[in-house]
Amino acid sequence: MERPQSRSASVLTDAPPRQPLLWAALAYACGILLGVYAWRPPSWWLIAALVFGSSAAFLVRRRPRVAFAIILSALCILGALTIQVRGPVSGTVPNLSDGEETLITAHVVREGIPERSGPRDLRQRIDLETETIDTDTATTAARFGIRATLYDKEDGESGASAMPHIFHYGERIRFSAKLNRPHNYRNPGAFDYEGFLAEQGIVALASCKAAEVELLPGFSGSRVEDWRVRVHRSIIQQIARLWPGEQAALVDALLIGENAFVGRDLLTDFQRTGTYHVLVISGLKVAILALVTFWLLRRMRVGEIEASGITVVLTVAYAALTDVGAPVWRATLMLAVYLCARILYRKKSVLNAIGAAAIALLLIDPHALLGASFQLSFLCVLIIAGIGTPILQRTTQPVLRALRSLDAVSYDFALPPRLIQFRLDLRMIADRLQNVLGSRLPLQLLSRSGRILIRACEFVVISIALQAGFALPMAYYFHRATIVSLPANVLAVPLTEVAMIAAMAAIAISYVWLVPAKVAAMIAGISLRAMAGSVRWFGALRLSDARVPTPQLSLIVLAGAALALAMILARRRAVLVFVGLAAVFTSAFWICAIPPHPHTKAGSLEVTAIDVGEGDSIFLVSPQGKTLLVDAGGIPHWMHSELDIGEDVVSPYLWSRGFSRLDRVAVTHPHADHIGGMHAVLANFRPRELWIGPGDFNSELRDLLREARALGIPVTRHQAGDDFSADDLSVQILAPAADAISRKANDDSLVMRVSYGATSALLEGDAEKEVERTIAENRPAADLLKVGHHGSNTSTIPELLAAVHPRFAVISVGARNVYHHPRPEVLARLGESHVLTYRTDLDGAVTFYLDGRTVTPHSRDLE
């Protein structure tokens, strides 16, 4: 007869799973997502949490596994409650006249670094906290964050900067400027610039000439922060002394996270190759610093507890010094938790340490979960600890143990037979080498070279796992398939380690003696040149420029499930480990190689005016799914903006719709606000044809045509009178004429009428009155009019409206633009003609569906 188990034995066999803190962190994170996407009254969540909590307390001794599951459910509910109680991250500005001139008194809370924004243009961006705001009617005491851009020019003869003062932390200033709220491009897939600034406490933007800023007496701020900023500034100055140009910019980025001086082309190469993480202060930098510090302290015979404490203190000091925000503090917290767990529990609770750090960070800021930085940081450590480490523990780690003390025969008895045989083989090889290398050197050489080789293999294994696991977030956030990431990182990461250690040593020594500091600086410089060269080489490969659209929800779920499966199976039998890895690599291949089905509406011609600010970009999708992009927006060079409308606005919109290729693109005329973004569109979507008008080329159009030829894209000229079919669409070119000679580039705009069935759209580009009169003579009736020249009074004449007789109109225009488009006269003419008018500055991306009989407008609803 079988003896019944005691209650205590039952409890032991029904214990909760391992890594409870990791599971708790995942449950809490799921609750945060649930609270974001499924709003319920907070009282509902609170009641549910109390019910689940009391149920878990009742079952904890009777059914521990059931109780554990209920506790996770309660944590999930608490996560939903927390995010809804906290509310969205936002900032409010007092009720001021948006865009009106105001007198601002403020103090500097984050000083900027002067940088060049043009051949002779300088600028300095600083963050301010306001004290008072003076308008024509009142003086208001207000405290809110402003990001101010101060402009100046170099002296044309001497080359000296005209900027009278570099503004530092705590200084009080007064200046006149227009306060504007941050504005997002209102397209699906657009970056939330307003939310990004709100997280930093910035709720308004301003700009003025630096010479017009009045420096006030007094200091406002924290003396501790002032000391930190001074140290930070001093380090930047030392970097400028030790390294020239690009090397100094790379050291700035490498050590303190300041990448403002790294050129956009090099930054793009780092992004293409998947090595951008070496230019930001991330877990990699914290890990390198901690590893070197801990290793040196242990070699100096410092105890493990003391070495761990000193390492944490130095890492916290480094995080405070860089001041790059949450990412470095997350890495620092994770390091501290890991070192504590290592002291208390050795290496058995790494995943628990990760879970504890995640819970702490999400309790402090639950909104962090929604950011790419948080997700990438924790995904990285989860892949390393949950997949990479278990595989290495069963493969390379035993070999590393076998390479220890090869001359100690007694150590053999602590190892399994196969490793004993391995050690015997190495000793036999060492015996053969004794005649050449002596009696002691061969064993040391074999041991150290074997360790280096195995560490290199471990790095490759971890890199492969990370590349496969990061396929989903890289596609979702950056729309990149970093195919060359593995070889690029194999070179970049070791060079980064050397450069970082040498650069830190050089800066520290330079405060004492400059000559030896330059020796260390030279070592860092060689590493930096090698790193930049390898990144440029890999970045120049066409293979490295693979762009992918946003993965569909089903694929996101499957990829996440594959990662979870691989982590669960990583400690199982070899066959199961292979199954888990195969699932991860299959999902990564699917994300990178198989494009999703684009979001379109079958049976209708879609015409979408993408919000590109003060510019034009019109996207057409035929009933059969063929695509035509007319213009791609852009920013004039005199605005000195680093924003690329094609890369940063148009492409994310198309990727969010699931498009990876375009059939055709067209440039109406070569003005920057129409052609500027087309370079990125050609590179990202490789269209099968480029349409242009018959007019003369300017330098911008010549550059674009040169790029099209390099990419193998055929170029087709169209002119007035062309009437043809493009798949299931009818296209009629109304202007310009082949022999038209105009002094206005706007009048050379490629004007086209696109029809499907009995419905049509007239796309004017920037055509003005003279061209519109010619078009009106042909009476090209259309249901939808893309208003010419952004609603300027130079276009949309009454004759055109009478001839076209549109039911709908759309104006592509920038919010608060300096041209005051659209003009009231144009809006009045459209109203008098009973045209229902949409504007991208007010309505965001606007879509019209032409089904051959009727036209249906949709504002920011493209599903």
Image (cartoon, rainbow, N blue to C red):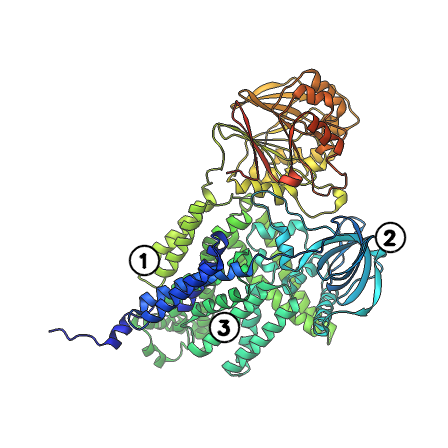
Badge 3: residue crowd in 10 Å (few <14, some 14–19, many ≥20)? many
The amino acid type of the residue labelled 1 equals Leu
Residue 576's disc is 1
The amino acid type of the residue labelled 3 equals Val
Q: Where does the image place residue 338, in percent across and percent down from the top left?
A: 48, 72
Q: Where does the image place residue 183, in percent across and percent down from the top left?
A: 67, 48
Residue at image position (74%, 24%) is: 797
Of 527 and 32, the residue lying toward us: 32
Of 817 and 488, the residue lying toward us: 817
Residue 119's disc is none
Residue on which the image places disc 2: 155
Of 125 and 423, the residue lying toward us: 125
Residue at image position (38%, 55%) is: 581
Residue on which the image places disc 3: 337
Asked if residue 275 is positioned above or below residue 229 in the image, the reply reads above
Q: Where does the image place residue 380, in percent across and percent down from the top left?
A: 49, 60
Image quadrant assignment for residue 813: top right
Tell me, yes or no, if residue 459 can be seen here.
Answer: no
Task: Give the quadrant of the N terminus.
Answer: bottom left
Give the mark nearest the N terminus, 1 or 3: 3
Mark 3: secondary structure: helix
The amino acid type of the residue labelled 2 equals Asp
Q: CA distance from mark 3 to mark 2?
A: 53 Å
Q: CA distance from mark 1 to mark 2?
A: 69 Å
Badge 1: residue crowd in 10 Å (few <14, some 14–19, many ≥20)? some
> Outermost residue toward the top?
778
Mark 2: secondary structure: loop
Q: Is residue 407 left or right of residue 96?
A: left
Give the mark nearest the N terminus, 1 or 2: 2
> Outermost residue toward the left?
1
